[in-house]
């Protein structure tokens, strides 16, 4: 069942990304991410109480700091940049650029966890980069402007780098107990950090005005629940019931699901080049993590 949960996580996340693309054209990335995180934290609270009880995790001060900083980096910053990339260059391109997540995790694991990379994994990096180039290359120059494409690739790659940093930071803690509590704490830390940032920069009032304006709230709510709650639970279930290497590769199939959902729901082009790029990226990820 671990493999099933991992693939389901990829499909649910991909559907959420496409729905965010549909709604993100009216609500900026920062506000969209804040709403998503707040809703996810609210939903995670009763889940933690039901499954793990009301006792706080017995973490050391250093572990508490790591969990909270991981939430700020991996959720407040990374998800905002991811949604920004989504608005700049579309769901298909963003989904494939996000496949850099596993290579980033491998690099950081080598640097900070003492893991070793083999030659075929280096070849996997080449495949991943080649796939991203195929998907992001502008065959139709009216599709996305060069500036938007460059900014989108930057924000997308930086977002998954921040996600990788956040995950590698808490990996030793995640291997213990309190999976759901950690997920809830990260969501809460990211939400609080975003609220503080909005208050300090004077953007809280403008943000509240946007929330009061007409928005596609049903789509935003469904996407937020899928992204910050359902996919999180499926990810944890896959991680617990299947080997981490297998689960992480199956999670990367989200790039393929995003391309398909974006074609089906958003009308984004499903060209042979994009299909080949997604296939190369997934093949590269398999080489990096499985071989």
Image (cartoon, helix red, strand yellow):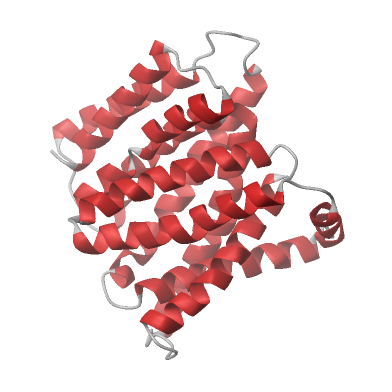
What residue appears at the point 51 percent right and 17 percent down from the top-left corner?
A: 269
Q: Position of residue 194 (x, y in %)?
A: 67, 62
Quadrant (top left/top right/bottom left/bottom right) for the C terminus? top left
Name above or below for residue 78 compared with residue 99: below
Residue 110 visible somewhere in the drawing: no
151 or 281: nearer the viewer: 281
Quadrant (top left/top right/bottom left/bottom right) for the N terminus? bottom left
What residue appears at the point 42 percent right and 31 percent down from the top-left corner?
A: 96
State which quadrant residue 224 falls in: bottom right
172 or 28: nearer the viewer: 28
Name above or below for residue 277 compared with residue 79: above
Residue 74 in the figure: left or right of residue 206: left
What residue appears at the point 52 percent right and 37 percent down from the top-left corner?
A: 156
Q: How many marks?
A: 0
Residue 248 in the figure: left or right of residue 278: left
What residue appears at the point 76 percent right and 47 percent down from the top-left corner?
A: 215
The furthest residue to the bottom: 55
Residue 59 visible somewhere in the drawing: yes
Q: Position of residue 249 (x, y in %)?
A: 26, 43
Name above or below for residue 98 compared with residue 229: above
Q: Position of residue 237 (x, y in %)?
A: 29, 62
Q: Position of residue 165 (x, y in %)?
A: 42, 54
């Amino acid at each position: 069942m671990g493999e099933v949960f991992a693939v389901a996580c990829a499909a649910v996340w991909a559907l959420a990304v496409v729905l965010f693309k549909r709604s993100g054209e009216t609500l900026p990335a920062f506000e969209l991410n804040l709403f998503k995180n707040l809703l996810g934290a609210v939903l995670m609270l009763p889940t933690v109480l039901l499954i793990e009880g009301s006792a706080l995790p017995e973490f050391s001060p250093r572990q508490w700091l790591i969990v909270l900083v991981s939430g700020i980096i991996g959720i407040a910053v990374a998800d905002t940049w991811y949604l920004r990339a989504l608005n700049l260059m579309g769901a298909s391109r963003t989904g494939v650029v996000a496949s850099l997540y596993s290579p980033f995790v491998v690099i950081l694991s080598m640097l900070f966890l003492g893991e070793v990379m083999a030659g075929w994994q280096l070849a996997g990096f080449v495949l991943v980069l080649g796939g991203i180039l195929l998907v992001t290359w502008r065959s139709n120059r009216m599709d996305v402007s060069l500036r938007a494409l460059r900014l989108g690739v930057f924000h997308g790659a930086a977002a998954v780098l921040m996600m990788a940093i956040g995950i590698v930071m808490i990996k030793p803690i995640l291997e213990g107990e309190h999976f759901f509590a950690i997920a809830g704490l990260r969501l809460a830390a990211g939400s609080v950090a975003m609220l503080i940032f909005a208050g300090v920069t004077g953007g809280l009032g403008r943000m509240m005005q946007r929330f009061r304006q007409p928005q596609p709230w049903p789509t935003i709510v469904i996407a937020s629940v899928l992204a910050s709650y359902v996919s999180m639970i499926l990810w944890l279930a896959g991680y617990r019931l299947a080997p981490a290497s297998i689960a992480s590769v199956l999670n990367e199939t989200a790039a393929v699901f995003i391309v398909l959902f974006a074609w089906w729901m958003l009308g984004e082009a499903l060209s042979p080049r994009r299909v080949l790029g997604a296939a190369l990226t997934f093949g590269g990820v398999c080489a990096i993590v499985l071989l």
